[in-house]
Image (cartoon, helix red, strand yellow):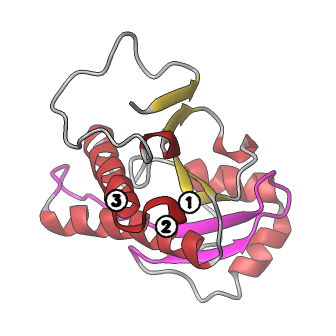
Amino acid sequence: MIRFWGSPLFAGQPKGEVHFKSNESLNPKISLFRGDITKLEVDAVVNAANKTLLGGGGVDGAIHRGAGPLLKKECSTLGGCETGQAKLTGAYGLPSKYVIHTVGPIVQTGSVGDRERQALRNCYWSCLETARAQQLRTVAFPCISTGVYGYPPSEAADVALRTVREYLDTHGSQQADPSETC
């Protein structure tokens, strides 16, 4: 069972196919939250950034506004970020300790192919690897690529949850306690 906190995502119980067996040691590590990611007191929030890392709209803009000008200054030293990669910075004015920036795929035609799915998977995996390397325990993810990048939200959520679960299955209790923020 995945825990939900914040405002309700939907009424009633989720419906659909079960993709993973219940795992009592992993289940408490994943929570879904609907709200403002810039207000979360976690080890790291993930920024759905553009390739320059210098701020933009949506979550990217909100994180940059919340963190203040020092975030942009640090980001300007990183040389950008390619799709599927992750880069770590301080969080500055945010209540989190760090920001993990990742660049999601752009869905041009409205239909998602294997290339976009793999690129989105790489975003989540790279962020979790970055968190693990820094020994970060709590990570809050936004829904990556679902805004102006055009990835359908339900398909993006499927990739996100599958990837996080696969990562936790692989790395078990030694890994972070990610939250999915949509």
Per the picture, the main secondary structure of the magenta-coloured stretch is loop
Rendering quarter of residue 98:
bottom right
Q: Is residue 131 above or below residue 151?
A: below
Quadrant in the picture for the N terminus? top left
The amino acid beneath tag 2 is Leu
Question: Marks 3/1: CA distance?
Answer: 12 Å
The residue at which mark 3 appears reads as 169
Q: Is residue 103 visible?
A: yes
Q: Is residue 57 visible?
A: no
Judged by depth in the image, the label closer to the viewer, 2 or 3, is 3
The residue at which mark 2 appears reads as 128
Contact (CB < 8 A) between labels 3 and 1? no
The amino acid beneath tag 3 is Asp
Q: Position of residue 118 (x, y in %)?
A: 24, 68
Residue lying at 58% horizontally and 21% vertically, measured from the top left = 7
Residue lying at 33% horizontally and 15% vertically, measured from the top left = 13
Rendering quarter of residue 39:
top right
Nearest the eye: 123 or 177: 177
